[in-house]
Structures are given as structure tokens and as C-alpha cells.
Amino acid sequence: MNKLNKIAYMFFIWAVITLCGCGETGDTRMYLEAKTQDSQNVRQSEAQSEFEKDSEIDTSSHESKSEEEKTCFVYVCGAVKHPGVFELPLGSRVYEALARAGGLRKDAYEKDINQAEQIEDGQMIEVLTRKEYMESQEQKRTDEKGMDPDQKLDQRPDGRIDLNTATKEQLMTLSGIGEAKAANIIAYRESCGGFSTPDEIMNVSGIGEGVYARIQDKITVMQ
């Protein structure tokens, strides 16, 4: 092999090596780009999952907060240890409000309060002492003695008020019955032809189970 042929052979070998090296570099570059894309996709998927989890937590927290915000305020006064205005969950009972006020004092007349009654927002719960209760009963008897004969006919000998004949003033002597509710009672009996039973009073606007529980032993319907 002469010198010229050696040079040509060496050039051929160099070209083959160079071409093979370029092919391997291209494959390597494509492999690295694919791996990089896969890593990016994984990171994006993980970030999306974290975002969805955070959204679920935020929604759950918001719902829990909304439930916690459903409260009402009641004023507890009279023969309790710590009178005041208290915030309680909606649907609470009178006994829970009394507990927040420190409980009943020793001189409280417990029988005058329905502790199982469901409280309402803005309600006042007044606890009388035994002395105050006796004085109120004595005052009621005194008032009854001074009534006109026509007014006395609206009450039974046991002191209960007849819903079908009582005046607005007599109805207002009942616990929880103010002027507006007394007027509603009279309007109801006039429009419906009178009451058939005492518990029918719960059909009157503004009078629910709580009010009825307080007055059911003090009202009647004469036939």
C-alpha cells in the first residue's frame, strides 16, 4: 500500500467513526429530553393533587365554620348565680342556658320553669324565687277578687282561663302572652268559631310548643 492509499484509508476510518459518534449523541440528547419531560409531567401531577387536597380542606373548614356560626343569644335573669346574656347553639334547651348562668340559686322556684323547653333567639328566661312566686300568686288572687262579675265567668274555680271567653287583658296574664299574641288568640277564635281543645292554641300565630308548655296548666276550654 503506497502512501496515497494509506491516507485515503485513514480518512475513510475517521469518517466512519465521526458518523457513528454523531448518531449516539443524537440518541442521547433525545433520551435526556424525554426524561426531562417525564419529570416535568410528574411534578405537574403532584402539584395538581396537592391543590385539590388543599381545596377539599378549605371547603371542609368553611362548612364546619358555617355550622359553628349557627348560634342564638338568650338573657337569663332572676334567681340564678350569674345572670347575663349568653350565646348558645341553636336548638339548645333552657337547662343549658341555666347552666351557663351558673345554675339556680337555693331560693329559686324551680317548678315554675320548663327546663326542657327549646330556647329561641332573643328569649328572656326569668327565674323567680319562691318568695316572688308566692307573691305573684297572691297578687293574682287579689286581682281576681277585684274583677267584674262578667270577668270572673271567664275563669274556672281552679283559676284556669277559658280561651273561648277570656278578654285580651286576661290572656295577657299568661306567661309568654303579650298584647300582640293575645290579640291573635282572639282573632283566631273569632275566625274559627272558638277553640275545641287547649292545645289548639298552638295554631295561633306566634305561639309554639314552648309557650304552650308554660301555660297548658293555666288554660282550659269550656264546652
Image (spheres, rainbow, N blue to C red):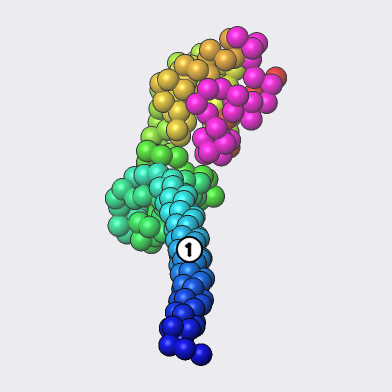
Nearer to me, 51 or 205? 51
At a point 47% along the width and 89% down the height, the residue shown is: 2
At a point 64% along the width and 12% down the height, the residue shown is: 192
The residue that label 1 is drawn on is 37
Residue 171 in the image: state x and y as whole percent. Answer: 48, 24
Left or right: 88 with respect to 158? left
Quadrant in which the C terminus is drawn:
top right
**Residue 101, placed above or below residue 132:** below
Is residue 41 in the magenta section?
Answer: no
Residue 207 in the image: state x and y as whole percent. Answer: 52, 28
Nearer to me, 96 or 42? 42
Is residue 204 in the magenta section?
Answer: yes
The reply to whether residue 200 is visible in this rendering is yes
Magenta stretch bounds: 191-216
**Residue 185, placed above or below residue 60:** above
Residue 29 in the image: state x and y as whole percent. Answer: 46, 69
Residue 188, by quadrant, is top right
Query: Under tag 1, what secondary structure?
Result: helix
**Residue 32, placed above or below residue 115:** below
Amino acid type at circle 1 is: Gln
Residue 199, by quadrant, is top right
- Please tell me how crowded label 1 is: few (under 14), some (14-19), or many (20+) other residues with Cα within 10 Å: few
**Residue 86, placed above or below residue 175:** below
